[in-house]
Image (cartoon, rainbow, N blue to C red):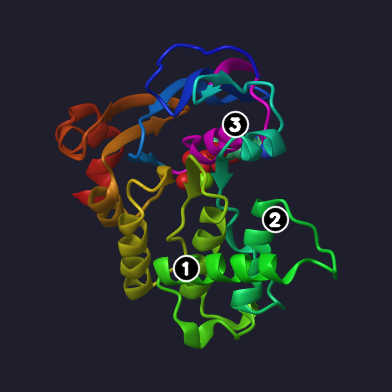
Amino acid sequence: MNALVSNANAVLEAQQLTKRYGALVACDQVSLSLLPGEIHALIGPNGAGKSTLIHLLSGSVAADSGRLALQGHDVTRASSYQRVAAGLSRSYQITNIFKQFSVFENLLLAMQACSGSSFSFWRARAQDKVLSEAAESLARDCAIAPEVWPVSAGTLPHGEQRKLEFALALASQPSVLLLDEPMAGMGPDETLKLTELIASMRGRTTMLLVEHDMQAVFRLADRISVLVYGRIIATGTPEEIRQHAGVREAYLGEEQA
Ligand SMILES: Nc1ncnc2c1ncn2[C@@H]1O[C@H](COP(=O)(O)OP(=O)(O)OP(=O)(O)O)[C@@H](O)[C@H]1O
Ligand SMILES: [Mg+2]
């Protein structure tokens, strides 16, 4: 990781990231800055390139051109593992939960992975205690009730699994957390609970939130960027975005009427 790119204040700064799939330009010179502690929502119609941008930021897909800086360091060529180690975390939806393990074991494993300790059978007991206390504290912060700690993660209701997934993503105390449609497939009650949970984590990490649920977006976002056909057409406060004529025409008009 080399020297900085430009906006010294930004936690994450994408400059003109482009990704083509054949003739289709899924992300077209996308520039985006995440400011410290903000919840930044990324909205736009289906197929606009939101998930592609998340992939470019996390490093699971390589950009054709453009640059990316994490806390002032150029990570354009860093692997996704290197980006995670540098503080960029991504919620991988249900797939990062070990379904056959209990909720608490999942939290413990995440803590252990982040602490860099090994799976050694002879691990010091003191270390076990530290990890277990950290896992408990994370569970409480994320409103995961002690009653469900012994339950197999795979048997939890969908909304509870999403909450656990969010907790697991926070275990590494990331400087940036990327969330791609965390509310997808949830009922209104579960959506509300996860919205409150994300709100309660405001300031603990910087978040980029891709979400179609406009109530959640306008409740949570400090700033919103709007992606249409691979291009960011506006970035601003929720109020600025609500009033933006081009955004209403391209997206919000149909969503919010
Ligand atoms: N691996 C791929 N190969 C080819 N085309 C792809 C690939 N991934 C995405 N695309 C295309 O790129 C465009 C952007 O897709 P993307 O999944 O990023 O959109 P999105 O904004 O996340 O949509 P949604 O709101 O439905 O999740 C779409 O036209 C999609 O078909
Ligand atoms: Mg998507």
The residue that disc 2 covers is 113
Q: CA distance from mark 1 to mark 3?
A: 32 Å
Q: Residue at x 45, y 75 (%)?
A: 144
Amino acid residing under circle 3: Leu
The residue that disc 3 covers is 56
Q: Do tag 1 and tag 3 residues touch (Cβ < 8 Å)?
A: no
Q: Residue at x 60, y 64 (%)?
A: 94
The region drawn magenta spans: 46-68
Element type at mark 3: helix
- Measured as percent of width and height from the top left, residue 119 is found at 81, 63
| Location of residue 45 (image quadrant) | top left
Q: Residue at x 61, y 34 (%)?
A: 86
Q: CA distance from mark 3 to mark 2?
A: 24 Å
Q: CA distance from mark 1 to mark 2?
A: 16 Å
Left or right, residue 208 beside residue 19: left
Q: Magenta stretch: residue 138 in it?
A: no
- Measured as percent of width and height from the top left, residue 227 is found at 40, 32
Tell me, yes or no, if residue 177 can be seen here.
Answer: yes
Left or right, residue 121 beside residue 176: right
Judging depth in this view, the residue of 242 and 178 nearest the camera is 178
The residue that disc 1 covers is 137
Query: In the rendered view, would you say 212 is above or below 238?
Result: below
Amino acid residing under circle 1: Ser
- Measured as percent of width and height from the top left, residue 52 is found at 57, 36
- Measured as percent of width and height from the top left, residue 122 is found at 85, 69
